[in-house]
Amino acid sequence: HLYLGESIDGGVTVHWGDGETTTLSGTSSALYDHTYAAPGDYEIAIEVTSGTLQLEANSTYSLFGKSNSYGDNRCNATRIRRVALGANVTSLGAYILYNCTGLESISIPREVSIGNNAFCSCSALRYLTVPAGSTQLGDSAFQNCVGLTHLSFPDGITGFGSNSLNGCKNLVRLAVPDTVTSISNNAIQGCDSLRRAALSQRLTSIGSNTLMNCISLNELAIPNGVASLPNSFLTQCTGMTRVTVPESVTSIGSNALAYLYSLGELRMLSATPPTLSSPHNIQSNTGLVIYVPYSSDHSVLAAYQAASVWSSFASRMQEAPE
């Protein structure tokens, strides 16, 4: 079952891989069915002879029939193993490969925009390179891609949508290109195996819960330019040992650094203590040392030790080496 549409009547033909073809009719998206004479592996080719192929999907329909979440046995998403995009494809629409749990590889030859939920729950997908020219990861684009171990991005991408990598439990490393300026809510939450994360040096906006529950992450340097650490930013990153907070940060949100039970070193680079609404915003083991900038008259250390809420951690504070 293929859910397809076209801009010109009769401009798209489906080659089913067994010698049979279907020419699309009308200009509205519709579900096209084909029955094979025998089970096996078939290569389906979708040929555009005129107009534009419409691969728009939604929460009810993905490219390969109805979504599994609706319990409809006409869904073929689990059977698809490989997808190759032609050179003229410019976008992957919302939900287009949603819940293709058997998808192992996809070839993306050129710049392609990636819509909301485009690869959501593609649990067998292990490696993917987002092509050059892509500018945005849609909301939930790779959410729950639990098999994904390597994901690379081109320079030029500017933002990660909400939940875009949420639940990618086997992703080990993440390098966010320096062209990225914003990361939305929950974008990298629950990436259990993530050990190294390099954030964009041009990052200015971070959403709440961004790295929540990344339990294997052990060190993070927050880029200078970020103005605030949002609510639950690193909550329950239980393996975190060192965090560096740049001088640009002026406020730390609720539970932003909470439940970091392995945290031994918190480096504050600002001479002015950021706003801290509650001591629960920072929760760690009893061995935590908070380093503040050195000043010859020790005035910065004194300012932190006297600042509202920060004073609760006065005994843990030290000046960083000069």
Image (cartoon, rainbow, N blue to C red):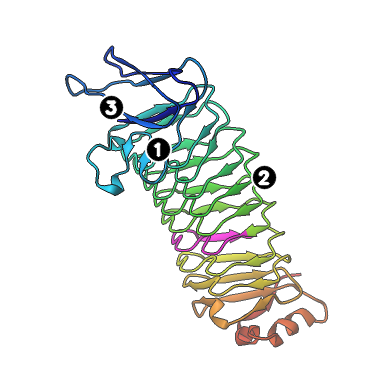
Mark 1 and mark 2 lie on one chain; the one further toward the N terminus is 1
Image quadrant holding the N terminus, namely: top left
- What numbered label is drawn on residue 33? 3
Between the C-alphas of marks 2 and 3, the distance is 43 Å
Mark 3 and mark 1 lie on one chain; the one further toward the N terminus is 3
Question: Secondary structure of the magenta portion, mostly?
Answer: loop
Task: Tell me which segment is drawn in magenta.
Answer: 206-222
**Residue 217 inside the magenta-drawn segment:** yes
User: What secondary structure is found at the residue carrying circle 2?
Assistant: loop
Amino acid type at mark 3:
Asp
36 sits to left or right of 258: left
Q: Answer yes or no: do the residues labelled 2 and 3 have beta carbons within 8 Å? A: no
Amino acid type at mark 2:
Thr
What residue did someone put label 2 on? 179
Pair 1/2: label in front: 1
What residue did someone put label 1 on? 97
311 sits to left or right of 79: right
The image quadrant that residue 67 belongs to is top left
